[in-house]
């Protein structure tokens, strides 16, 4: 029965996302919701000026419909979830949607003002920490504790610091996923493999609901790639990238193994760390650059890599990281 649930989640998420593109992209064109390309980005990205953004709405709806459609199937199969597990499932989904809403506000302000500036950094951080805190509070009220699993080590109780570390990690990771968006198809490709690894991990731990949500998220990424692969006909925008970041965190925290995002999300981490290193080095050396451009995918673009090659290589790295994560769950939990 589990395989049927997974298949249904994948088909619904993929179909809804892919089909929505036929309607949403022309609508975004009609509304003039085109991306404004940053002046500091690669010069050849100017050709992408005006490509519709906010395309993340496609896979947000696809994943929502898939997860909600599979809920009755879980009950019919006799798979009962505890209040805590339901809180992690639907609370995590709500967290992802809330992050997507923050991204939508940022995209909308940017599009209306016709410049690549939306919410201020302070506004985004305040909202993001509020969403992370709301999720952690929900889990706590439903019986969650302050411990986390570490493969090959066991459960570690962090006490009150768990909430501080978790909130910081969620916001850090969500923004790392956001930085990974910048090359046609890159974020969708990387996220597909991350979701696949998390779905397999949840399945190994017999968390069917979370596993189905991971499968739906992976399938939705493929549905979006139909429209986002180079040359992209639509961008996911912050609407999509922040939602994906929230969903990745929802799954990792849902299975109580956020540490898995270190190997599985290695590309995300490299992207945001490259930005941090670039800024720090630039300030310390009074204008020198560590990379030709950051985030790191732009560095490889400036080195002559095509967008397709970047997606392939970064995707391959994610496959290796995801495989390590799954093996850690299989043999270390």
Image: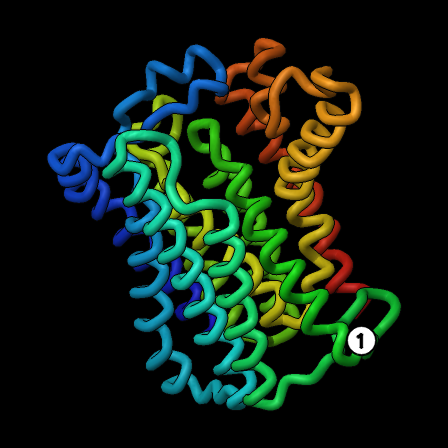
Task: Residue 181: give x, y in percent of width and height.
Answer: 48, 36
Give the residue displayed 63% in from the left and 27% down from the top. 296
Query: In the depicted view, which residue is nearer to us: 119 or 223?
Result: 119
Residue at image coords 55%, 52%? 174
Q: What colouring does the structure picture have?
A: rainbow
Within 10 angstroms of label 1, few (less than 14), some, or many (20 or more) residues?
Answer: some
| Location of residue 132 (image quadrant) | bottom right
* Side of 164 where 219 appears, left or right: left
On screen, residue 145 above or below 318: below
Q: Is residue 192 left or right of residue 222?
A: right
* Side of 298 where 274 appears, left or right: right
Can you name the residue that lies furthest to the right here?
153
Q: Quadrant of the N terminus?
A: bottom left
Instruction: Please name the residue shown 33% across and 51% down the image.
Output: 105
Of residue 41 and residue 59, the one placed in the foreground of this image is 41
Depth order, front residue of 267/280: 280
Looking at the picture, does residue 163 appear above or below residue 66? below
Residue underneath mark 1: 158
**In x, y percent, where is residue 283?**
73, 26
């Amino acid at each position: 029965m589990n395989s049927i649930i997974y298949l249904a989640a994948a088909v619904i998420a993929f179909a809804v996302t892919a089909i929505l593109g036929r309607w949403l992209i022309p609508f975004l064109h009609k509304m003039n919701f085109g991306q404004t390309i940053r002046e500091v980005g690669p010069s050849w990205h100017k050709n992408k000026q005006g490509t519709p953004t906010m395309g993340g709405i496609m896979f947000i709806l696809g994943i929502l419909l898939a997860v909600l459609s599979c809920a009755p199937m879980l009950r019919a199969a006799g798979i009962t979830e505890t209040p805590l597990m339901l809180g992690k499932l639907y609370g995590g989904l709500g967290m992802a949607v809330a992050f997507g809403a923050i991204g939508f506000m940022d995209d909308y302000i940017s599009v209306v003002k016709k410049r690549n500036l939306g919410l201020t950094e302070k506004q985004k951080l305040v909202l993001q920490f509020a969403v992370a805190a709301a999720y952690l509070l929900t889990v706590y009220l439903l019986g969650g504790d302050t411990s986390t699993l570490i493969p090959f080590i066991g459960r570690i109780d962090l006490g009150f610091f768990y909430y501080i570390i978790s909130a910081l990690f969620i916001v850090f990771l969500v923004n790392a996923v956001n930085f990974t968006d910048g090359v046609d198809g890159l974020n969708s490709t990387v996220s597909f493999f991350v979701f696949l690894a998390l779905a397999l991990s949840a399945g190994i731990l017999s968390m069917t609901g979370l596993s189905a949500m991971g499968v739906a998220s992976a399938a939705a990424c493929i549905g979006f790639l139909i429209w986002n692969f180079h040359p992209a006909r639509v961008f996911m925008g912050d609407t999509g990238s922040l939602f994906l970041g929230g969903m990745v965190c929802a799954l990792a925290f849902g299975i109580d193994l956020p540490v898995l995002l270190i190997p599985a999300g290695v590309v995300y981490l490299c992207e945001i760390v490259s930005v941090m290193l670039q800024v720090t080095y630039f300030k310390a050396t009074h204008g020198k650059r560590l990379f030709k451009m950051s985030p790191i995918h732009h560095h490889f673009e400036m080195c002559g890599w095509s967008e397709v090659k970047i997606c392939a290589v970064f995707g391959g790295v994610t496959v290796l990281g995801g495989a390590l994560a799954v093996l850690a769950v299989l043999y270390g939990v």
